[in-house]
Image (spheres, rainbow, N blue to C red):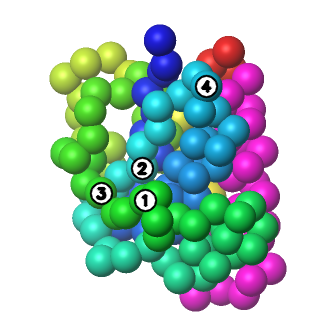
Amino acid sequence: MKKKVVFLCVHNSCRSQIAEALAKKYGKDILEVYSAGTMLKDKINEDAVRLMKKIHDIDMQVSQKPKLIEDIPKVDYVITMGCNVVCPSFSYKVEKFDWGLDDPSGKSDDEFIKIINTIEVKVLDLIKRVR
């Protein structure tokens, strides 16, 4: 049975969406993947969408949308992106990790690419742990 993971951020518009896309790409055989926020933006960060399409050929606008934590099912893992999110309390047991990532929104493509690459490494490590 696949393990369920949510990548949690405040607005669910950038880092958590990138993590969701990469976890789906690399871990689809063992993970059921979600991202969510405690508040929402109306769309995924345009720079994140553009660079994920360019680097990984993933069109996040087709496969993903911003979601609230209330919109996802029960999960096994909660991973916060490092945006000082106060995690909602869960009425069931979850494993929690904080990846401590800076928000690249409004920064250069180079900063975005560094975050994308860091998330990719962390996602691959998560997949190894789950296996």
- State the mark number for residue 12: none
Is residue 93 magenta-colored? Answer: no
Indicate the quadrant where residue 24 lies: top right
Q: CA distance from mark 4 to mark 2?
A: 18 Å
Q: Which residue is mark 4?
A: 29
Q: Position of residue 69 (x, y in %)?
A: 27, 47
Q: Is residue 42 left or right of residue 20?
A: left
Task: Give the Cα separation between the discs numbered 1 and 3.
Answer: 9 Å
Task: Identify which residue is drawn at 47% across, 31% down.
Answer: 32
Q: Quadrant of the C terminus?
A: top right
Q: Are marks 3 and 4 in contact (CB under 8 Å)?
A: no
Residue bearing the label numbered 3? 67
Q: Quadrant of residue 101?
A: bottom right
As drawn, the label of residue 64 is 1
Closer to the camera: disc 1 or disc 3?
Answer: 1
Give the Cα distance between marks 2 and 1. Answer: 9 Å
Q: Which mark is first along the chain, 3 or 2?
A: 2
Residue placed most toward the observer, 58 or 101: 58
| Residues rendered magenta in the picture | 102-128
Query: Mark 3 belongs to which amino acid?
Result: Lys
Amino acid at dot 4 = Asp
Q: Main secondary structure of the magenta part?
A: helix
In whole angstroms, how far apart are the C-alphas of marks 3 and 4?
23 Å
Q: Position of residue 100 (x, y in %)?
A: 60, 52
Q: In the figure, is residue 50 to the left or right of 32?
A: right
Nearest-to-viewer mark from 2 and 1? 1
Instruction: Identify the amino acid type marked 1.
Output: Gln
Q: Position of residue 31 (x, y in %)?
A: 54, 28
The residue that disc 2 covers is 35
Q: Residue at x 74, y 61 (%)?
A: 56
